[in-house]
Amino acid sequence: MTRSPRAPLAPLAPNASLRWDVVRRELPHRRARVLEIGCGQGGFGSRIAARHDYTAVEIDAASWAVADARVRAVDPGARVLHGSVSALGPTETFDVVCAFEVLEHLEDDAGALAEWAARVRPGGVLLLSVPAWPARFGPWDTLAGHFRRYEPAALAGLLRGAGLVDAHVRVYGAPLGFLLEAVRDRTVAAAGRHGPTASDSMTERTSGSGRKFQPSTRLTGTVIAVGTWPFRLLQRAFPRSGTGLVARARRPQSSPEEESP
């Protein structure tokens, strides 16, 4: 099966558009085997699948169905599995393992990182994104089922604790991200959804978070892409300011003799 270069890419929300500008520059230039954990509705997945051998897992059934259609429209040979990492073969490893806006939803983040790192081949990389700065925890974080936000140094420490090396953490999103986050928090608060309810478990809020505030049409996606273009460039001038973090770390080779120079 071959890729379809003319297949439409999934539309990205404004924050995701800012994030993708950072993420895409951290992905390998050469074709690689890439796993995305928690692919949501396939916004990043459709873009990664256009260039790499792509596999994804997604727990939420509704998001998985959308992602499967979007990703396989780009590459019919891509795999989008409904489930967790356990849906993969027990010995499968990848050149790149990605998890975008997933770690903050997991109570045991250190345990999750160790599980993900085990899926990175020796010499490969783990690439992830999370919301930044614990002091910015707000109504959207609660509604979305976030346990926490992260300081850059703390995130780098977690990556090292998972046995990874060469951890690099980049802050992104300034200045537009601050405005987007403020609007999102006020929208959630105005709707009266700034605290847990009896019917909303953390699992339910996490599952639903990937479907909220997501554009669904090509036209909306195009408008967002055009509107965020200058801010995607501007944020590169503020690598220590913003509302989100993108981190990259490497799994060491099996032995010192195999380490890359």
Image: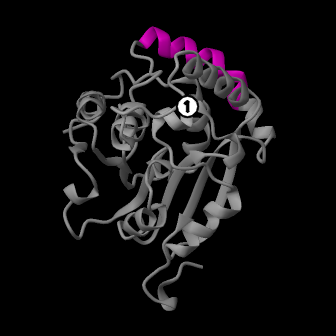
Q: Residue at x 64, y 15 (%)?
A: 227
* 193 displayed left or right of 93: right
* 166 displayed left or right of 114: right
The percent position of residue 49, horizontal first and vertical second, equals 35, 40
Q: Which residue is mark 1?
A: 140
Query: Which residue is nearer to you in this view: 237 or 206?
Result: 206
The percent position of residue 191, horizontal first and vertical second, equals 52, 16
Tally the marks: 1
Q: Is residue 137 magenta?
A: no
Q: Residue at x 56, y 44 (%)?
A: 23
The quarter of the displayed image where residue 50 is located: top left
Q: Residue at x 45, y 64 (%)?
A: 113
Q: Neighbour class for label 1 at 10 Å: few (<14), some, many (≥20)?
A: many
Q: Looking at this view, name the residue that lies furthest to the front.
A: 198
Asked if residue 208 can be seen in this view, the reply is yes
- Mark 1 residue element: helix
Q: Residue at x 39, y 63 (%)?
A: 116
Asked if residue 133 can be seen in this view, the reply is no
Judging from the image, the colouring scheme is one colour
At label 1, which amino acid type do we have?
A: Trp
Task: Give the overall secondary structure of the magenta segment.
Answer: helix
The percent position of residue 74, horizontal first and vertical second, equals 30, 31
User: From which residue to which does the magenta span run?
Assistant: 218-232
